[in-house]
Amino acid sequence: MIEAERIEIAQDYWVKEGRINAPEPHMIERRDDLAGVVRLIDAINSDPDLLDRVKKRMIAMAKAAESPPAVSAAEESEGGDVQENEAAD
């Protein structure tokens, strides 16, 4: 929320100083996105069952990221050789 607040304060200051006519839309979107993430985290933290499910899912995702990629059946039947196509010059 601090970052969302910082964006809003900076945009308001730049408008007041005349550097910009109105708050920049992409910065307002970023502020709103950050505030939405904070609300989502608050919602997850307020529900112990949901929090446990999120933690379990994060652990599973971390384990999946650590394991090597699975070899497809097609690669196994071809002897595991991977052919790369070179672009023609």
Image (spheres, helix red, strand yellow):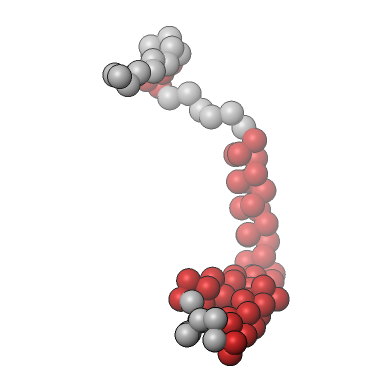
- Counting from the top left corner in percent of width and height, residue 11 is at 58, 81
Residue 49 in the image: above or below residue 2: above
Corner quadrant of residue 51: bottom right
Task: Look at the image and tell me in which quarter the C terminus lies.
Answer: top left
The foreground one among 88 and 42 is 88
Which residue does the image show at 45% across and 13% down from the upper left? 80
The foreground one among 86 and 49 is 86
Residue 64 in the image: above or below residue 87: below
The foreground one among 74 and 33 is 33
Residue 83 in the image: above or below residue 58: above
| Residue 46 seen in this snapshot | no
Task: Look at the image and tell me in which quarter the N terminus lies.
Answer: bottom right
Which residue does the image show at 53% across and 29% down from the upper left? 69
Which residue does the image show at 67% across and 77% down from the upper left? 6
- Counting from the top left corner in percent of width and height, residue 62 is at 65, 44
Left or right placement of residue 82 versus residue 89 in this view: right
**Residue extending furthest bottom?**
16
**Residue extending furthest top?**
79
Count of marks overlaid on the render: 0
**Residue extending furthest front?**
18
| Residue 13 seen in this snapshot | yes
- Counting from the top left corner in percent of width and height, residue 32 is at 54, 76
- Counting from the top left corner in percent of width and height, residue 81 is at 43, 12
Corner quadrant of residue 47: bottom right
